[in-house]
Image: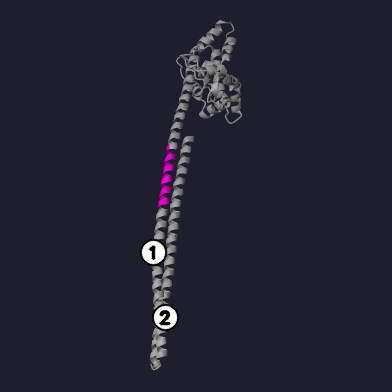
Amino acid sequence: MDNIVIEPEKLFDSCDQDRKGYLIPCDLQAVCPQLDDEEINFIFTTLDSDGSGRIDREEFLGGFQNALCHGENHGYPGIKRRASIVEINRKTVDVPSTSDVVHECLAESNDSMVMVNKSVGRTQEETYRSVSGATSVVDFNLPCQDEILQLYEKLQSTGMPKALSCFEKIVVSFCKEIQEQRDQNVQLQHAFESEREAYNRHMNEVENEIDQHITEIQQRAREEERKKLSHEKEEIRCRLEGEVTELRTNITKMKMMVKKAGTSRSEPANQVKHKLQNLSQENEVLKSKLAETHFELAIIKSELAIVRTDYESKKEEMSNDSKALFENARQADNLQRQLKLL
């Protein structure tokens, strides 16, 4: 099985059932379903020299073998073996049965052992395909293929047609079951890919909704904070203007009283001192009110800092929630990959 021989001309004719004179990827995929999409794309990229999206007959015959050898050395091990397993349709290809091959070989010579070995040496894979009623794909990529072929040769040499026929049916049934399992795995792979794409789309939608929600909350918080700060600044400004006006009025009164004291020297000095004391007390009261105003302003600034801290903490919590959602999504993706491996 190391020296695999592929006839590109016959393979091209099998793929080009419509006799178009060229191949597209689905033609080769239909005849060689054991090749995956990446391998098909690799073969077509290698052979499609002009980038037309199709392969002419001359391009296929001249470069198919080299493309398979190139693929073996560049990340596609076993591509040559898988490409050699071609789908056989019994309606269009007439394959002789094993018993006919053996009897024909025995009829041509008196030495039965020599002729049986010659019939086995023709093509062992062709013998496996020869069970009557086998119209499906038979993949000979078996773990114990060499042992099966050796056992088949021994059964042929014993001259037991019933045991040989039963062995053939068992082997082909086993090959069919393997192919069915592979087809089922391909279907499950496609279903998994579609589910993963739907899940990724859903997660993208959730991510967009979360981002939009965070943006709206941030805009509302900034707008509320701006309005609150504007209102507080306006209140403080009005209060300070009132206090400044009151201070100016008191200063004017004090100047008038000093002026009166200078003009009316007959007024007792005690009354003037008393009025000055009253004015001084009023001035102290105004100063204390001004200090209280500054203290309230400091409190307001402190409350504003607390509000900002709450806003930052809320923002961080929402960011953590978003990260948690993304982490859950990543874990779910990992679980799906593990399920795929199982």
CA gap, disc 2 to disc 1?
31 Å
Amino acid type assigned to the residue bearing label 2 in the image: Ile
200, 111: nearer the viewer = 200
Amino acid type assigned to the residue bearing label 1 in the image: His
In the image, the segment drawn in magenta is 198-216
Which tag is nearer the camera, tag 2 or tag 1?
2
44, 239: nearer the viewer = 239
Q: Secondary structure at mark 1?
A: helix
Task: Describe residue 37's horizontal placement relative to residue 225 as left or right.
Answer: right
Residue corresponding to mark 2: 251
304, 325: nearer the viewer = 304
Q: How is the image coloured?
A: one colour
Name the residue at 43% across, 72% down: 294
Residue 129 position in % (x across, y down): 50, 17
Residue 60 position in % (x across, y down): 57, 21
Residue corresponding to mark 1: 231
The question of residue 209 being in magenta is answered with yes
Query: Which secondary structure dominates the residues rendered in magenta?
Result: helix
